[in-house]
Image (spheres, grey):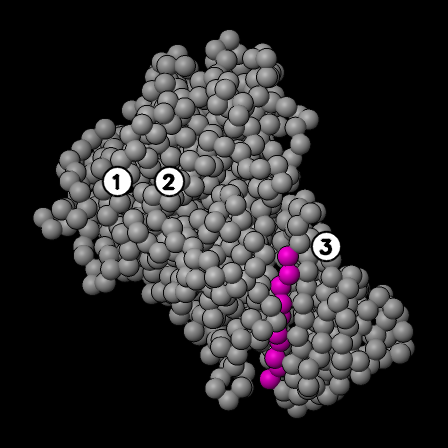
Amino acid sequence: MKIRILARRARRIKSHAAASLAIALVAGLIGPALVAQPASAAGPIANPAASVNTFIGTKDEGNTFPGASAPFGMAQVSPTGKHFAGWQYDDTTVRGFGHSYLSGAGCWEQGGLLSVLPTTGEVGPGKSFDTSNGRTFDHTRYAATLTHDGEIGTAGYYRTRLTSSGGIDVEATASTRVGVQRYTFPATGNANVFLNTGQANQTLKVKNSSITIVGDRTVVSEIRVQGFCSGKDFEYTTWFATRFDRPFASSGTWNETGGMPGSTAQPSGPGQKGAWVSFDTSENRTVQLSTGLSFTGMAGAIANLVEEGLDDNGTIIPFDAVKDATVAEWNTELRKATTYGGAANDNVTFYTALYHAFLQPITSTDVDGRYRGFDDKNHVADGWTYYQWFSLWDTYRSQNQLLAMLQPERAQDMARSVLTIQQQGGWLPRWAYANYEANVMTGDPASPFLADLWRFGAVQGGVTLGAEDTLSGTAVELDEKLLLAALLENIDTAPPAGSQFAGRSAIADYIAKGYVPTNRWAPKKGMDTDEHHGGSATMEYAVGDCAVSLVAKGLGDNATAVRLASRAGNWKNVWNRAATETGYAGFPRERNADGSWGGATGGFQEGTAWQYQWLAWQDADGLAEAIGGVAQAISRLDKFFDIGGVFADPAGAARGSWVTGALDYNRIEYNPNNEPNLHAAWMYNFYGEPAKASAVNRAAQTLFTNKPNGVTGNDDLGTMSAWYAFSALGMYPSVPGSGDLLLHAPRFPRLDLDIGDTTLTIKADGADGSKLQYIDGVQRHSTKRELHQLGSVEEGRNA
């Protein structure tokens, strides 16, 4: 298979990311020759939004949500069942349709706030919904049954049918800040909508909530919940303003004692709370509601609803108009990567992966630019968007770079957001959830995350990243030199004891000893701390040191670059040459403070020494030497991937030889379900056998399918989906901060990538995702002007 890489100038300029990306496309790889197939004549997918299947990942701990969202939207409307992530495909009941969800995370606070459910039946003492019995309004009791028959889940639109209550059709869509639902009831005089503020997802703790019925078609509510992933010390509030398209026939509120017909309010407090509104659908069977969300206050929620959910006359924008606009927006975003040819299921799987990668982080600014900062104050982002929900330990490995390539303007604002967190909160985050640091996972993901965004042009010299704060009068102005200052503070020091951030909590020992000593009794500020996983924390720190070294070098700080480049080799300090496993000698191990070695298990977060050993890829030559030479490194990779099994039966090896359980971290094989070794296949490229990287990629791609279990492991805010997208594109980001891309066989005969001011076309005639294929040559085609803009390359270079 010969790959042709073409670049053509677009008519518009979005950002500086394209130049950095294309300069990196210099690695031409060669493997066993492929007998060329005829080029596919199929044109581009005309409506990629319709090719998205939102049910992919809703089974076997993919933890995606099937409901509706706009790209990077604040509002998501999706069903809630008994699973902690919100809903799983096998759930038989729906407790409500919430308005706030994470996509693919593995922890148990996943939203589902303001859970709304349509029902039928009378509400009153002794009636179908007995107001004299408080248990009536527990959503586990009034939950509805559903059927998958006729169910639809595409980009921007969701539909299902509730089979209880005489059958109710539920449709959902969303603009950026407004969730919209349309119910089609049976012909009845007793159609109700329950709005539950006291309950959300299965394990989410609602700390306080309130709800108020305003007039005859509006409900406002406020919900404060416990923090993410054991974040017991952190809480955050979301405000909701809900408008219906017709007046209520009757209404009431409830608490733990029961329902109160005619009541218009439940004050803020803990426990069961909610409201119901009722309609006569004997003739007009449809009811629409639109809900504005905000993290800044009720005024923000109302303003968002008015701007995005109502027309100039204050009337609800019709459901289909919102849906059509959101679907059009999704088509615009998904066309950032256009496929030509390929099997139908391949296109569905690819565009769904892209869709999942474009869901989060979410927009956090209201329509007037206000957002809630990490100092717990409201600020204004003037001319840019503040984002939140940064799962950096996951996303720095693939999703971050995909957004930098295909969403350069948004990536710039995401860099602004993370640096603004540092300015307002006092430190760079690790897992920034809402407006607090969750301290989930270990290592230092902020450094490689920001280094790659800088390399792709998301932080430029002199760029103003914020506007004057309307409350404090301070200004947040950040450029690439201030970026380096923030990175150096983060990697050379630890946050103060009173800070909510953990940062590099073991940095003092790391600098003094060259590694993070394992200390099982070290205190922690959240779910995790580096000292509990000294082996993997050391290797993560070293990757971050390398990334910041590259930033420093690029900004002319050579002394810092040399210092950190040396520290990037600290992985060697946890490499025990005497350790043996399954016939191989030399493995990373955790170390104690006195320098003694730990055992073969422990010290590596969500992984083993076999899986983490490849995280020293910033020093591939040194890693090969530690293993015993390149031949030994290749032999170990072959065992890790069961390469013989991959060549014989790619799908069989992926589902039988590798780690197959979503949460099974304790084996020596390749774990395609989790982040630490996502890059491992491309170690073959460093060691001169890139054909095997192509083979492993094709095998791993079989784990991503057009089925509910079609995402392997937790999707982790689009990380696994972004990995698949890169794998299908035929490239993968190399060492963080380098800007390099490692090539392998693409899955499609042609792909067009909109990378800002340039369209990159990748042609691989005869590409067929159903079989093992390899690259036998790479050619670049470009005009002189484009070569100047993109950087020079060696045409047809082989490695």
Q: Return the residue nearer the eye: 786 or 370.
A: 370
Amino acid under disc 1: Ala
Residue 704 percent location from the top left of the image: 47, 46
Sequence-wise, which precedes: disc 1 or disc 3? Answer: 1
User: Looking at the image, which residue is at 77% across and 71% down?
Assistant: 267
The image shows residue 549, relative to residue 190, as above or below, that is: above
- Quadrant in which the N terminus appears: top left
Amino acid type at image mark 3: Lys
**Does label 2 or label 3 sit earlier along the sequence?**
3
Name the residue: 51% across, 51% down. 424
Residue range in magenta is: 236-245
Task: Kindly report which numbered mark, 2 or 3, lies closer to the viewer in this rendering.
Answer: 2
Q: Which residue is mark 2?
A: 484
Disc on res. 548: none
Q: Give the Cα separation between the discs numbered 1 and 3.
A: 46 Å
- Quarter-of-image position of residue 730: top left
The picture places residue 726, in percent across and down from the top left corner, at 37, 44
Mark toward the start of the polypeptide (1 vs 2): 1
Q: Position of residue 517 (x, y in %)?
A: 57, 21
Instruction: Write down the residue under mark 3.
Output: 205
Measure how far apart labels 2 and 3 are at the Cα level: 39 Å
Judge from the rendering whether residue 678 lies leftward or rightward of residue 218; answer left or right: left
Residue at the spot of label 1: 24
